[in-house]
Image: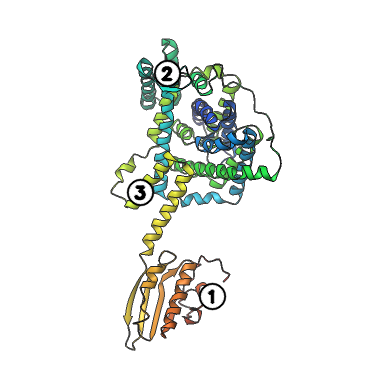
Amino acid sequence: MFQLTCPGKQCVKNDVLSGLTVALALVPEAVAFAFVAGVAPLVGLYAAFMMGIITAVIGGRPGMISGATGAMAVVMVALVAEHGVEYLFAAVLLAGLLQITAGLLRLGKFIRMVPHPVMLGFVNGLAIVIFLAQLKQFQVADENGSMIWLSGSSLWTMLGLVALTMAIIHFLPKLTAAIPASLAAIVTVTLLVILLDLDARSVQDVLRDLSGDPMATIAGGLPTFHLPMVPLTLETLQIILPYAFILAGVGLIESLLTMSLIDELTETRGRGNKECIGQGVGNTVNGLFGGMGGCAMIGQSMININSGGRGRLSGISAALFLLAFILVGSSLIEMIPVAALVGVMFMVVLGTFEWASFRLLGRIPVADTFVGILVALITVFADLAIAVIVGVIVSALVFAWKHAKQMQAATQLDQYGKKFYRLKGPLFFGSVQTFADLFDPKNDPHEVIVDFAEARVYDHSGLEAIDALADRYMRAGKALHIRHLNQECQNLLVKAGDLVEVNMMEDPIYRVADDRVA
């Protein structure tokens, strides 16, 4: 059921004011990411508007903000540089269709497989990335167009305004919750700079530095329908398809992980598959209306949540305010001091970083600590999607290694000279060597019984290990009997199939990961 916001005027007010705060923070980031991708500022602003309003309306996570992001912008650089912006629009359109397909196939549920150490690393790494991105605002273009660090009074003014912004955001909620602290901080610092005529860099200064155009502005009209002007050939598909897959993957991973974080903060649960479809529709529309596409933005989403935005109205408001800035309010937005927006983002960094992870050092397994640090470092120095994929793979390998050592066997000789192996633990690709080492066909008696009552076979490798064990005993001229193996395993075994003792009352029932037909 579609629910715009929670019941009550207070919820509406919180969502609208929070949306305004988010929109103010969206402007410089959308412009910066547009320049990262090598496209015009309006392409990034249009993307932020279209992604924001579409995902707010049909996405699976109320309160989450989507727009143009750095994670996707860095993927676009090579495509735009080599083939032009029209190929970018085509790739974004195709990426959107792939994301819709992922949602329809219900692949969003796989985000639940991301281990908690990977989530910690993702959150901490992203907090560091957001912090490092703000440091660029402490640079200014010199007469040659090169970026140099602020110094002297300009630097101290910038630092003072950032500190004032952070102080207002921290202390205002203790006095009143009538308006979002971030919005109050931005308005207060802007008025202070104007009234005192302080030498502080504004959003317009950032536009000039990034574009090199002294007349640069965010002003524009409504986005218009525009089919990507690319040849409809197989060669075009070969060019854009790899980028489309990467954009779709990066967008879904960042969006679903952000959704999981907001779920935890709000103690509610978003709908992953619906969010995949929402992101896909947003990117498809971007490709058809001249936007660079995007995905969920953890920084702006945190601003929204911390400012009281919980409903879909907050995301819709943010997108509509952003559109209003583009159409009629560009001159006002360009007056906002960058220091105010940097201060807001620094508070997001402080709120995003999991400081409790330091207390976990030495209290959790070393492998989990390693995975968290590894994911954070890869997020900072490489790419979010790569970091998460590597983290999941390493976590899976650590899990397999730990469980591989749990395969054990208790042995016993009965009064008739038969040897019993009572197995305990999982038999899968990681434990097959441990399983094989438990047995001694050369020195075992003539009759051996292997009992699987407390063991379980998980995959094809486990089945092959049982067949290999049967072969070893047959070559040694020994009689091997296998008990309590489930019916599916019995059907799939080749060499050991005739050696299985069938007991329909006691044999367990479970499924084995194998691609052969039982």
The residue at the far right in this view is: 232
Residue 194 spot, x, y in % from top left: 45, 12
Q: Earlier in the sequence, mark 3 or mark 2?
A: 2
Judge the density around disc 3: few (<14), some (14-19), many (≥20) Cα neighbours within 10 Å: some
Q: Where is residue 424 in the image (x, y as percent from the top left)?
A: 37, 70
Q: Gap between marks 1 and 2, in whole Å?
A: 74 Å
Give the residue number, with chain letter if any, for mark 2. Answer: 189
Assess disc 1: are there few (<14), some (14-19) or many (≥20) residues with their C-alpha within 10 Å of its C-alpha: few
Image location of residue 314, percent across then percent down: 53, 32
What amino acid is labelled 3 in the image?
Phe
The residue singled out by tag 1 in the image is 491
What numbered label is drawn on residue 370? 3
Callout 2, which amino acid?
A: Val
| Rendered-image quadrant of the N terminus | top right
Q: Distance between the residues labelled 3 and 2?
A: 42 Å
Mark 3 secondary-structure assignment: helix
Secondary structure, mark 1, is helix
Q: Locate residue 135, reporting x and y percent.
A: 41, 28
How many marks can you see?
Answer: 3
Q: What element carries label 2?
A: helix
Q: Which of marks 1 and 2 is in front?
A: 1
Answer above or below: position of 368 versus 160: below
Q: Relative to 31, is 167 on the left or the right?
A: left
